[in-house]
Image: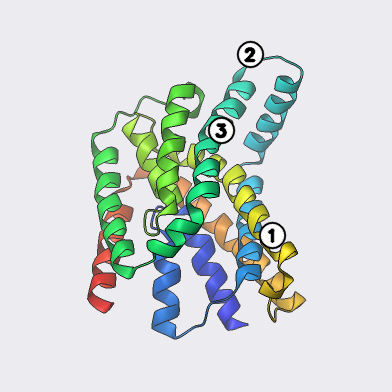
Amino acid sequence: MLHTVLLALIQSATEFLPVSSSAHLILAPRLMNWTYHGLAMDVVLHVGTLFAVMIYFRSDIVAMCRGACDILRRRFDGADVRLTLNLAIATVPALLAGFFLHDHIEETLQGTKIIASMAILFGVLLYAADRFGRMDGTVGTVTPGKALLIGLAQTLALIPGVSRSGITMTAARALGIRREDAARFSMLLSVPTIGAAGAWEGLKIFTAPETVGDISMTTVFVGMAVSFAGGALAISFLMNWLKRSSFAVFAAYRIALGAILFWKF
């Protein structure tokens, strides 16, 4: 059970902070001599973190639902519609890349040195984008073109060590979106992305139930609850941090993490 709690905390925290969950999920088991937790637990942890985003940004989720309803009614004006369309545009590239490239990348780009290199490279890019990017853009001023660029950047997160939240926040800052709004757009973009990933993994379990392994309902509830709580705390921490500071500490952490991976493995 302690294994489940620690894994859920690592997954939920690093899913939303721009520090690369894949790097941590490789480093932690190797340092602690854990075995792979299984596909079913992946789904459980994704569902927990998905609920954390939806509850924290519940007003935005409601706005997205209103926007979707307006689109179905062929009404294309208003902030809610723009938000919904921009998130949809930004989601499409990752869905297509994940469908066509996920298995290939999983087979060829899992090496520790690749993960370490990506952690360092995109840590440097995060710092540069945050240091030199303008600060005049908001979620409301994101255009379809900018949404597409953020979505294209998100496809790079298929490479372990890049970080989905990290690369989307980096792209948003490079496009002049201020820090809090860059994080907010990234979090909202995680809703369809994590939802699709969880659904895909769930489909794999449904079609190949032997992948579930030996997992009890207690483990499921504990993993989901901890990943929800950890995700909510991580989101709250990041949003409050960005009100008064920059992404520099996360960039430095990524670079240090990459160096540790090179040194240890």
Q: Residue at x 64, y 62 (%)?
A: 43
Q: Residue flagged by tag 3: what amino acid is it?
A: Leu
Q: Residue at x 68, y 78 (%)?
A: 213
Colour convention of the picture? rainbow
* For residue 6, side relative to residue 251 (left or right): right
* Crowd tier of the residue under label 3, counting other residues whose Cα lies within 10 Å: few below 14, some 14–19, many 20 or above: many
Q: CA distance from mark 1 to mark 2?
A: 36 Å
Where on the picture, by quarter, is residue 174? Answer: top left
Residue 52 seen from this side: no
* For residue 63, side relative to residue 116 (left or right): right
| Sooner in the amino-acid sequence: mark 3 or mark 2 | 2
Residue 202 has which mark?
Answer: 1
User: Foreground mark, 3 or 1?
Assistant: 1
Where on the picture, by quarter, is residue 259? Answer: bottom left
Residue 119 screen position, x and y as percent: 31, 58
| Sooner in the amino-acid sequence: mark 1 or mark 2 | 2
Quadrant position of the C terminus in the picture: bottom left
Count all numbered tags in the image, as a single digit. 3
Q: Residue at x 58, y 82 (%)?
A: 2
Q: CA distance from mark 3 to mark 1?
A: 23 Å
Quadrant position of the N terminus in the picture: bottom right
Q: Which residue is mark 2?
A: 77
For numbered disc 2, what is the local secondary structure? loop
